[in-house]
Image: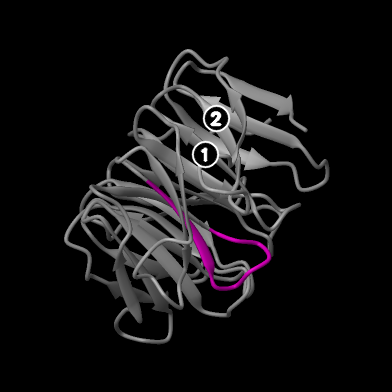
Amino acid sequence: MYSYETQDGLYDCAWSEMNENQIVVCSGDGSIKLFDLTLPVSLHEHTREVFSVNWNLLRKDVFASGSWDHTVKMWSPESKASLATWKEHSGCVYQVSWSPHVDGRFASASGDATVKVWDARAPRSGMTFRAHHGEALALDWNKYDPNCLVTGGVDHAVRVWDIRNTTKEMALLSGHDYAVRRVKCSPHSGTVVGSTSYDMTMRLWDFSRPSGTGLLHVYDAHTEFVLGLDFNLFVPGQIATCAWDESLHVMNVG
């Protein structure tokens, strides 16, 4: 087992799909740590806590970071300086996520209540829309539809968007009692979404169902805020969650 100590709390981690030894983590001191298991590198340009890191799913040789300094940056393991910096958000950038369909496209969710969609080759975002009534905390791209984006926010809601027309969400999934901290689209279904919340639950939804009937499952065994969520790519219906109760839960649903 490998273990590394840092000087501040860590908010997110992402494993490279190109190099089996590389994992990137983001820190409360504004730095990004690139670990090559035996040769860690610190990338320090952000001026506030770094809340999110995410590898490009198509190129796999660059990653993006989002920070409380309101910026998004793009990095390469081959360089100690960022490749690009974007500063358009007027609030914390809580999450960045690369599209699994379109090369160079990524999205960011911010405390300014907006989601922005970017092309990494362009100096400015290509799209901005108000995603929530209050801070937008989470987002994920649909694994089957390149135009579908799912978001979560402090308004307790999960919203499903078609980025070709963001005047109104495709689906509104209501049921959480507090802010939605993470959303994740299923790799096994184009309409199933998972969400976790400060209400200490994980909820599973099918947004293709009629309004008000999309809730599939509620998992409430955690005793603190649930922040992490992922689907097992190899076992349909198997889901992992982690929470501030210092526990990781793995369940089978369906």
* Mark 1 and mark 2 residues within 8 Å of each other at the beta carbon: yes
Instruction: Judge whether 83 appears above or below 7 on screen.
Output: below
What's drawn in magenta, residue-wise?
Answer: 141-152
Residue lying farthest to the left in this orientation:
90
| Image quadrant occupied by the N terminus | top right
- Whether the magenta-drawn stretch holds residue 142 is answered as yes
Mark 2 Cα-neighbour bin, 10 Å: few <14, some 14–19, many ≥20: many
| Image quadrant occupied by the C terminus | top right
Instruction: Judge whether 222 appears above or below 210 on screen.
Output: above
Q: Position of residue 37 (x, y in %)?
A: 62, 46
Q: Position of residue 69 (x, y in %)?
A: 21, 55
CA separation, marks 1 and 2?
6 Å
Q: Position of residue 21 (x, y in %)?
A: 67, 52
Q: Toward which corner of the image does residue 100 lie, by quadrant?
A: bottom right
- Whether the magenta-drawn stretch holds residue 126 is answered as no
Where does label 1 land, which residue?
A: 195
Residue lying farthest to the right in this orientation:
235
- Residue type highlighted by circle 2: Met
Instruction: Judge whether 196 appears above or below 211 on screen.
Output: above
- Of pointers 1 and 2, the one earlier in the residue sequence: 1
